[in-house]
């Protein structure tokens, strides 16, 4: 059985996430303490007690989701002897989850990853004035039709495909008026629904260029190592192991499409038969079942999840 570890992105956060892990495992407590210290912020308090509005702020949600993922990674290592390098054929993460994947594979230290995601969140929020950008999920259209709707809706503004999550679930991003136009056009192309998303900024489009510049600068200042296993990068849907290529890919990812459907398809084509989502929620587990129906998909995010997962991981 070939295994891929996958790491969730924004939208999977929930007040209380990681709390049970911290209560039960010293390794998890150590992760949350290290992240709090790296950020000079009591992020774990926001994660466990809220308020939800504070946790949803992208500068908090991004490092918080990574912290829960890394807590699961450390518990697997310390309690069960399951390491990324020894167990997984590859890793991948959805948007910010790519940083979690790289931290798990040893490319970044935990503290550096937390600081990078805090910078990323702040830069993405600051890239556009609040209310000028938007994102919408187009349901029931394939990627080509969704991208065409985005292009037609642009009309001189920015509007592009941001997330290709699965066949029939594509997210578009850009100027608010352009996204609204594209959402209406999508319905004429056969979309079942077009849902405006409750986001604070238009992620993964050209409007994020200031944030891409900020990440190029920040990534240039941190130590990077080759990952223990290849990372299947969002922007190329292909494996990367060279730190310089990973750095360039992470910069491109800020304004580029998260090609998640293709990432999962690539992993399945390479023989992955088990997708294990590490962290908060089960969004990627659901997408794996859509994108690679022949494979198994499970999630580990709470202490109760380990019992079912361990027999599969230890094979």
Image (spheres, rainbow, N blue to C red):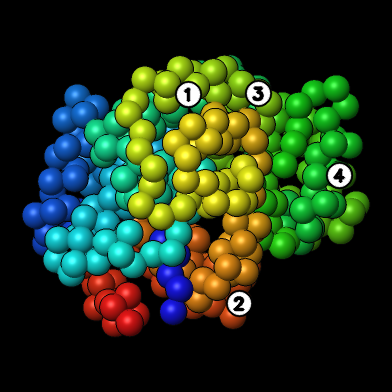
Q: Is residue 67 above or below residue 284?
A: above
**Local crowd at mark 1 within 10 Å, few (<14), some, or many (≥20)?**
many
Q: On the picture, is 76 further left or further right than 294?
A: left
Of the image marks 4 and 1, the number of the one nearer the N terminus:
4
Residue tagged by mark 3? Answer: 207
Residue 148 numbered tag: 4
Of the image marks 3 and 1, the number of the one nearer the N terminus:
3
Q: Position of residue 151 (x, y in %)?
A: 85, 36
On-image quarter of the C terminus? bottom left
Q: Nearer the viewer, residue 209 or 159?
A: 209
Residue 285 visible from this viewpoint: yes
Q: Is residue 293 above or below residue 157?
A: below
Q: On the picture, is 59 further left or further right than 232?
A: left
- Estimate the spatial distance between the alpha carbons at disc 1 and disc 2, rounded to whole Å: 35 Å
Q: Is the C-beta separation of discs 3 and 1 under 8 Å?
A: no
Q: Where on the picture, by quarter, is residue 278?
A: bottom left
- Estimate the spatial distance between the alpha carbons at disc 3 and disc 2, rounded to whole Å: 35 Å
Of the image marks 1 and 2, the number of the one nearer the N terminus:
1
Residue 215 numbered tag: 1
Q: Is residue 163 above or below residue 89?
A: above
Identify the residue shown where x is 27% and y is 57%: 73
Q: Is the C-beta separation of discs 4 and 3 under 8 Å?
A: no
Q: Position of residue 49 (x, y in %)?
A: 23, 44
Of the image marks 3 and 2, the number of the one nearer the N terminus:
3
- Estimate the spatial distance between the alpha carbons at disc 2 and disc 4, rounded to whole Å: 27 Å
Residue 293 numbered tag: 2
Residue 200 visible from this viewpoint: no
Numbered disc 1: secondary structure:
helix
Q: Nearer the viewer, residue 185 or 101?
A: 101
Of the image marks 4 and 3, the number of the one nearer the N terminus:
4
Numbered disc 4: secondary structure:
helix
Residue 171 numbered tag: none
């Amino acid at each position: 059985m070939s295994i891929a570890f996958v790491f969730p992105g924004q939208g999977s956060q929930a007040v209380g996430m990681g709390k049970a892990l911290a209560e039960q495992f010293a390794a998890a407590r150590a992760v949350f303490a290290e992240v709090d210290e790296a950020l000079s912020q009591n992020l774990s308090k926001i994660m466990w007690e809220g308020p939800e509005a504070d946790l949803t702020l992208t500068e908090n949600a991004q490092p918080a989701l990574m912290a829960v993922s890394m807590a699961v990674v450390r518990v697997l290592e310390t309690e069960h002897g399951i390491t990324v390098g020894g167990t997984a054929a590859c890793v991948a993460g959805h948007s910010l989850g790519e940083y979690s994947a790289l931290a798990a594979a040893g490319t970044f230290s935990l503290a550096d990853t937390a600081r990078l995601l805090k910078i990323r969140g702040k830069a993405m929020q600051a890239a556009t004035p609040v209310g000028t950008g938007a994102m919408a999920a187009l349901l029931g259209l394939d990627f080509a039709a969704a991208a065409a709707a985005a292009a037609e809706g642009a009309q001189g503004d920015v509007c592009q495909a941001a997330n290709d999550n699965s066949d029939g679930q594509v997210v578009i991003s850009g100027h608010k008026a352009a996204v609204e136009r594209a959402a209406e056009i999508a319905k004429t192309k056969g979309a079942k629904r077009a849902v405006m998303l409750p986001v604070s900024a238009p992620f993964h489009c050209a409007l994020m260029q200031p944030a891409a510049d900020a990440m190029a600068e920040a990534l240039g200042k941190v130590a990077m190592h080759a990952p223990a296993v290849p990372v299947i990068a969002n922007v190329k849907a292909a494996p990367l192991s060279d730190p310089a290529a990973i750095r360039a890919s992470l910069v491109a990812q800020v304004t580029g499409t998260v090609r998640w459907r293709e990432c999962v398809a690539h992993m399945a084509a390479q023989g992955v038969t088990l997708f294990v989502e590490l962290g908060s929620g089960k969004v990627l587990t659901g997408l794996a079942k859509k994108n690679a129906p022949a494979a198994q998909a499970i999630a580990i995010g709470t202490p109760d999840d380990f019992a079912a997962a361990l027999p599969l991981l230890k094979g």
